[in-house]
Amino acid sequence: MKILITGGAGYIGSHTILEVLEKTSWQVISADNFMRSEPETFGRIKKITKKEINNYDIDLCDLKKTKKIFSENPEIEGVIHFAALKSVPESVTNPELYVHNNIESLKNILACIKEFGVKNFIFSSSCAVYGNIDTLPVNEETPIQKAQSPYAETKQEGEKIIAKFSKENPAIHCISLRYFNPVGAHPSGLIGEAQTGNYGNIVPAITQTAAGIQEQFQVFGNDYKTRDGSCIRDYIHVSDIANAHVLALQFLFGKGNKTNFEIINLGTGNGVTVFETIKAFEKISGRKLNYVIGTRRPGDVEAIYSDSSKAKKLLGWTPKYSIEEMMASAWKWELYRTRENQ
């Protein structure tokens, strides 16, 4: 069985490739043009698994090139679509880029799975679709509020496109996985979040500050209506997220779904503040983090964490890693990258 993982060199895509290779007999192909990732990722995957990954270095916004993947691989049984830009701050400053990249690539992938008869599709969505909500925890029935960033708008729009597509194509089965805040790295320490530039992801910013790569870490606001004034997030280990994608595809292959478009939350159910995240890092690393408190950042939601009971019921999925284990794996990865770049 062959599956396509778009964005396979990216953070969650690479961990999902590892999960597939370690837990299944599926053959994987990838599509990634390294817009926000590194070609070296596939070498690291080979180091862990001893397996080569066939990657198509193409822009999925190019329909002709996207079709080539499917025409050359008629055995594709399922697609996991990660490929998208995901920085909230960058989306605020460059919304046109996000709308074009995230929406056009999705439309092209859907057009191809229809044309080439692929029956199973997993969409990488986000808790950002919920916006600022009044009731916590968030479940799949929580009403969608106004998007707080152009990035969130692309995920809302993406789900609308899939909902319409699934109604028009009842033989194709789709799942949208709305995950909360993926952090951490593979237990080997060889694969993790390869963040370069200021894209606003909290854990790489913490570890890069501790490693001396950036001067200081900035907490964006300490005047929110939370227990310590900083934003609350539901951090979840990237390997737990990767495992959920494999389980979701197995769920579709086993025809466990009652409708052809399911929406499923992925989170731990535990809300952790930014200051608590810093303390968890300091505990596992033994280092005092150099941080400053700044103003609120445009596009940030005050507090959000998940009710993931549907994922447990349908997929048999439960997250395994604690916040300390998440931070420890991220720090192990940061130290590996620091040595690698010396």
Image (cartoon, rainbow, N blue to C red):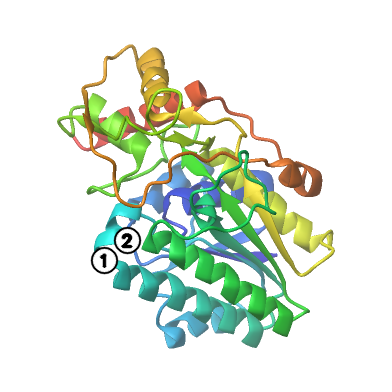
| Residue 252 falls left or right of residue 292 | right
Residue topped by disc 1? 94
Residue at the (59%, 72%) spot, across then down: 160
Residue 214, which numbered label? none
Residue 224 position, x and y percent, is 38, 34
Q: Is residue 332 above or below residue 172?
A: above
Answer few, some or many: residues within 10 Å of disc 1's Cα (few below 14, many 20 plus, some between 14 and 19): few
Does any portion of residue 30 appear in the rendered image?
no
Mark 2 residue type: Ser
Residue at the (72%, 46%) spot, across then down: 311
| Residue 251 falls left or right of residue 14 | right
Q: Residue 2 sits in which quadrant?
A: bottom right
Considering every residue shown, the one lying at the far left of the view is 215
Q: Is residue 56 above or below residue 175?
A: below
Residue at the (85%, 63%) spot, across then down: 258
Residue 158 position, x and y percent, is 53, 70
Mark 1 residue type: Asn
Question: Could you tell me which secondary element the residue under label 2 belongs to?
Answer: helix
Residue 91, which numbered label? 2
Foreground pick, 329 / 107: 107
- What distance separates the C-alpha of mark 1 from that of mark 2? 5 Å
Answer few, some or many: residues within 10 Å of disc 2's Cα (few below 14, many 20 plus, some between 14 and 19): many
Does any portion of residue 77 appear in the rendered image?
yes
Q: Is the C terminus in the top left, top right, bottom left or bottom right quadrant? A: top left
Question: Could you tell me which secondary element the residue under label 1 belongs to?
Answer: loop
Residue at the (67%, 58%) spot, across then down: 26
Residue 67 position, x and y percent, is 51, 84
Q: Residue 177 sits in which quadrant?
A: bottom right
Residue 292 position, x and y percent, is 20, 27
- Is the C-beta separation of discs 1 and 2 under 8 Å? yes
Q: How many marks?
A: 2
